[in-house]
Every structure is written in C-alpha cells, then in structure tokens.
Image: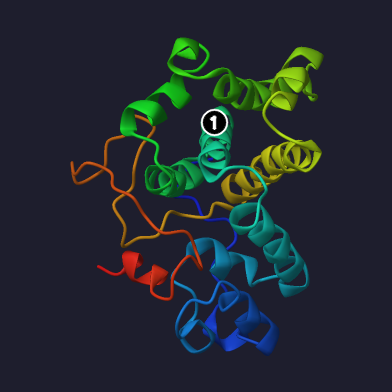
Amino acid sequence: MTDKMQRIPSLPRERWTDDARDVFAFWGEPNAREEGSRTSIMMVLAQHPAMALPYSQWSKHLLMTNTLPVRSLEMLILRVSVRVKSLYEWHNHVGYGLKAGLTLEDIAAIRDFPETADHWTAEERAVLQAVDDLIDDHHVSDEVWQKLGDHYDTRQKMDLVMSIGHYVMTSWAISSFGVPIEGDVDPIGFDLKTVSGKVPGASLKPGESADWAKQYES
C-alpha cells in the first residue's frame, strides 16, 4: 500500500446529495456545499455521510475543544503519526504543531522519542510515553498514568487517551482508504523536508478561521 494508491475515490459530483454536501461543509470551508471540499479526507468520507457526520462531530471536539493544552495535543498527534506511519496526519500536524508553539527541533524530537527524552519536561515525556504505551501495550502504564496525573485532571486524561485512539483509528482509515495528501500543497516528509525544499511553516486547523482553506490554494 502506498500513498499513491487511492482505494476509495473522492465522491463524484453526480452523487453529491444534501447529506454529502453537509460532510463537505462541516468545517465551515467557504463554498464547500457548492464546490466540494479542498481536503481529500472530507471528499472521501462523503462516500458515507451517515458515518462521516458523527465522526466529524467527534473529531471536532478532539481537535478544537479538547481539554488538553494545544501544544500537548499536537505533540500527541505527531507521535501517533510517526508510530503508525501516517504521512497525511504528519504533514498536516507539523503545520498545526508549529502554530501551537512547537519548533522544528521539537518536532524532530517527537519523531525520535524516546532517544530524545531529555529534550522534554516530565509532563511532555508522559504525553509521548502514553502514546507509545497504548500502541505497544494497549494500555497506559501505572507509572505513566501517575505522571499524567501530576499535570492533568480526570477530563484531560480521558481526552488524552481518547485522542490517541482516535488518531490511530483515523490514520488507519486514511492509509487503508488510500487518501492522498492534497495535490496543491507542499508535502512534508518524516525527515521534515518538503518536496519543494522550503522550510515547513505554521498552518491553520480546519475551521480555525474563516479563511483557513485558502492555505490549500496554489
């Protein structure tokens, strides 16, 4: 399976029902109901609106109203992206992470954890280790759970575990469906190099501002 093999195509225009258009427009992207979404994942998810709409509601909570600090959330998602080899999520969340205050050095240290454990505070190490615990052992260890409790309340720990699971699931879906990175962006690899050679920069999350989708314009 490679990033170029799209198993589930974007929904063709002749099948753009009202429910499908609700999927396109969910994140508030301008003109999406009429023109479709510029994001590959939404155009694929529109094949199954009954699944896509509740999934999107859940995704919106985890991405936009999560009780975790934004920096910690982006660290978590980037670590998941590395562990499950999701270039789609990595590409997008490098930009979101930079906007959340991470540096490219930080992001490289997320990729190379646990060898880079000394780079992080106790709180940050616990977040990254929780990802590895869940992926490797399917539960957060007692030691890491206690360390998380030194910094996060019950709701935050719940959001943390659910966020890790959500982004693992989403990454599995993206890779299995063959969802491509948008064709008019400059893809960022796990080496933090772009195809064009430009240094990666900060980017907006879906719905973060009225003109967030303009970043996909060539």
Q: Residue 73: horizontal and vertical position, in percent?
A: 58, 41
Quarter of the image with the C terminus in it: bottom left
Q: Residue 214: horizontal and vertical position, in percent?
A: 34, 71
Q: Tell me the amino acid under the disc marked 1.
A: Arg
Element under label 1?
helix
In the rendered structure, the answer to whether residue 67 lies left or right of residue 35 reads right
Residue that numbered label 1 is attached to: 79
Q: What residue is shown at x 43% (from left), y 45% (from top)?
A: 100
Applied colour scheme: rainbow
In the rendered structure, the answer to whether residue 110 lies left or right of residue 129 reads left
Check the image and report above or below for 74 versus 62. above
Whether residue 115 is visible:
no
Check the image and report above or below for 98 versus 58. above
Quarter of the image with the N terminus in it: top right
Q: Name the foreground residue: 151 vs 216.
A: 151
Choose top left, top right, bottom left or bottom right for residue 148.
top right
Q: What residue is shown at x 66% (from left), y 39% (from top)?
A: 168
Q: Name the foreground residue: 172 vs 115.
A: 115
Q: What residue is shown at x 48% (from left), y 19% (from top)?
A: 120
Q: Residue 68: horizontal and vertical position, in percent?
A: 64, 43
Check the image and report above or below for 40 versus 195. below
Number of marks present in the image shown: 1
Whether residue 75 is visible:
yes
Q: Name the foreground residue: 77 vs 17.
A: 77
Q: Residue 24: horizontal and vertical position, in percent?
A: 57, 76
Number of residues whose C-alpha sits closer than 10 Å to that of mark 1, classed few (under 14), some (14–19) or many (20 or more): many
Q: What residue is shown at x 60% (from left), y 44% (from top)?
A: 171
